[in-house]
Amino acid sequence: MADKVTSLLVAERAGVSQSAVSRVFTPGASVSKKTADKVRAAASELGYRPNVLARAMVSGKSRIIGLVVAYLENQFYPVAIEKLSKALQKHGYHVLVFMAAETIENIDSVMDEILDYQVDGIVIASVAMSSEIASRCDAAGVPVVLFNRSQDIDDITSVTSDNYAGGRKVAEFLLAGRHQKIGYIAGWEGASTQRDREAGFISALKEADCALAARQVGDFQTEQTRIAARKMFDVPDDQRPDAVFVANDHMAIAVMDVIRFELGLKIPDDVSVVGYDDVPPAAWLAYNLTTIRQRANLMVDETVKALREHIENPQEAITRRVAIDGPLIVRGSARLPKGWIG
């Protein structure tokens, strides 16, 4: 087995100091282009790769961000994770993904493992978080940002779409379309996104003196959503809602499949369907789903900004609750209000 190539060997080959080699491979470090070119050429010739973990032990900075997600079945999260990873890489950080269930107990079970990796920061997406976990991260000096979730915990920054306003937009759109019996299919009821979307939706309905005609829970799970759709729509015609708001697109697509292919109903002639997220399949002609768009690019930008502030300038960083307005994207799955101009 060949001897391991060290930074000292690279320095000798490039004719520079060992500290210069270290600076070349340290994100953000100051080094001239001439020196960097010589060092990288020598490293390439020798097959040298810097030991990131060893450098982290010396510097106390791993340049790793721990990302906790509950599930990837919802197409919004793979898209958002890709954008988040690329945005962090531009600033010299890399993402390490940890999977956990949605409940507080399950994230608690993986938190020790996350902190063991000496991460510089944590992003928690689609997962509930306790104040105890927040305290543990604070004690370890590791900042946390909630992505697409919010909780009433002091000193934790959260970045979401404006879910309450989005729910109101859906209700106003369906009411303007003269729907008489409007239903709602909820997601996991422990999620702030679900809670806020439903609250905004119900608020706008009440203001128009319109009672919710039916409610089921899909739990953000495909099979549970199919069951919920059957319960809501496999009923006599006079009991069936003529519109439904589904708490996210992942579930809305499952609802549309049940309505069309199991029950033989037409969308939007018999039932209007509106979702939330604007995932890529929502725009497919097979679904053509009217939905509220989560502006993933802006959400990622705010998340990265907050993380960097807390990591690089902890004394000046402030806690924020960021709620980004999302537009209603009108397609063909819902009846249009009279005179609607999109």
Image (cartoon, rainbow, N blue to C red):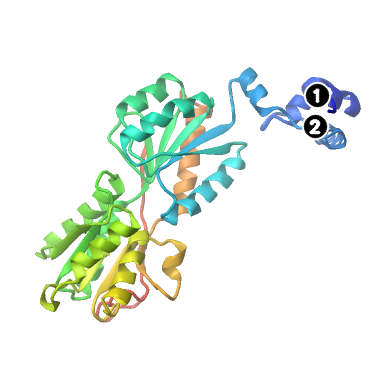
Q: Is residue 99 above or below residue 79?
A: above
Secondary structure of the residue carrying tag 2 is: loop
Q: Residue at x 82, y 27 (%)?
A: 5
Per the model, the C-alpha gap separating discs 2 and 1 is 7 Å
Farthest residue toward the front? 1
- Asked if residue 156 can be seen in this view, the reply is no
State the quadrant of the C terminus: bottom left
- Residue receiving disc 1: 6
241 left or right of 34 in image: left
Q: Residue at x 32, y 59 (%)?
A: 223
- Asked if residue 33 can be seen in this view, the reply is yes
Residues at circles 2 and 1 in contact by the CB criterion of under 8 Å:
yes
Quadrant of residue 109 in the image? Answer: top left
Pick the residue in front: 30 or 2.
Answer: 2
Sequence-first tag of 2 and 1: 1
Quadrant of residue 213 in the image? Answer: bottom left
State the quadrant of the N terminus: top right
Give the label on residue 313, or none: none
Q: Position of residue 118 (x, y in %)?
A: 53, 25
- Residue receiving disc 2: 48
Three-letter code for the amino acid on which mark 1 is drawn: Thr
Secondary structure of the residue carrying tag 1 is: loop
Q: Residue at x 26, y 43 (%)?
A: 190
Q: Position of residue 47 (x, y in %)?
A: 82, 35
